[in-house]
Structures are given as C-alpha cells and as structure tokens.
Image (cartoon, rainbow, N blue to C red):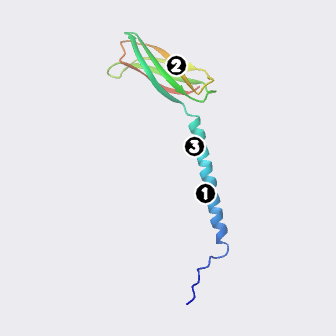
Amino acid sequence: MSSQRPRITPGTGKWWALGIAFTLAFTGFASWKVLSVADQAIDVTLTAVSVVDDRTTVVTFDLHRPPAQAVVCTVQAQDQRKAVVGTVTVDLPPATERTTTHQVTVRTTTRAFTGLVHDCVRA
C-alpha cells in the first residue's frame, strides 16, 4: 500500500500568498486609520458644577483634544425639569497640551439645578 499525498495544483501557492499579503496590508491600513482618527477625537469630562445664585452657574470641565486644534464649546445650565435656563458658547484657542481645564460662567434666567457641556466641535 502506498501512501500518496494529495498534490497541490501548480500555481495555487501564489494565490494563497497573494491573499495573505492582501489581508495583512488591509489589516495594517485599517488599524492605522482607526488609531489616527482616535488621536484626533475631542472628549469632555465634566469635573464640577457650582450653582452660585439664582442667576449664575459655574461649570468646570477637562477638554481632551489635539493641542493645535481650536474648539468651540456650548455650555448649558438646566433646572430640575432639565429645561435649559442658560447657554453660553465659548471659543477655546489651540493649547500647548492635549488636556486642558476650563471654567465657564453661565448666566441663567432662573435658578439652575445642574450644568453640562452640551458639545464641543472643531472651530
């Protein structure tokens, strides 16, 4: 009894090699793209809210962004029913560090219950 191995058809190996090379190249490109987009993200962390009086709320937050990027943030104060009672838009110039801390005073129409950073976008 002879044990013969099945033979691979000539030329099949190059297609396997080409498929593996394409898969590796695509995976590398996709990983690079995901990491480069994540590095450009703008992220906000609310650190403190102080209701000073019936007309003033102070919102403090950390802004994580590419240092060379100017950002415009909208900061709001809300009452207990989550109705917006004050809004201010703040222009934040480029910084030397990736994470910066900002304190924004929001003038309100009635006493606020809380404050928040509604959004921050590239300027």
Image quarter of residue 108: top left
Q: Distance from label 1 to label 2 (Cα)?
A: 45 Å
Disc assigned to residue 34: 3
- Whether the residues at callouts 1 and 3 have beta carbons within 8 Å, the answer is no
Q: Earlier in the sequence, mark 1 or mark 2?
A: 1
Q: Earlier in the sequence, mark 1 or mark 3?
A: 1
- Asked if residue 12 is positioned above or below residue 39 in the image, the reply reads below
Q: Which residue is mark 1?
A: 23
User: Residue 95: image x %, image y %?
Assistant: 61, 23
Task: Residue at the far bottom: name it.
Answer: 1
- Asked if residue 31 is positioned above or below residue 74 in the image, the reply reads below
Mark yes or no: residue 111 visible: yes
User: Residue 13: image x %, image y %?
Assistant: 65, 69
Task: Residue at the far left: name it.
Answer: 81
How many labels, in total? Answer: 3
In the image, 83: left or right of 25? Answer: left
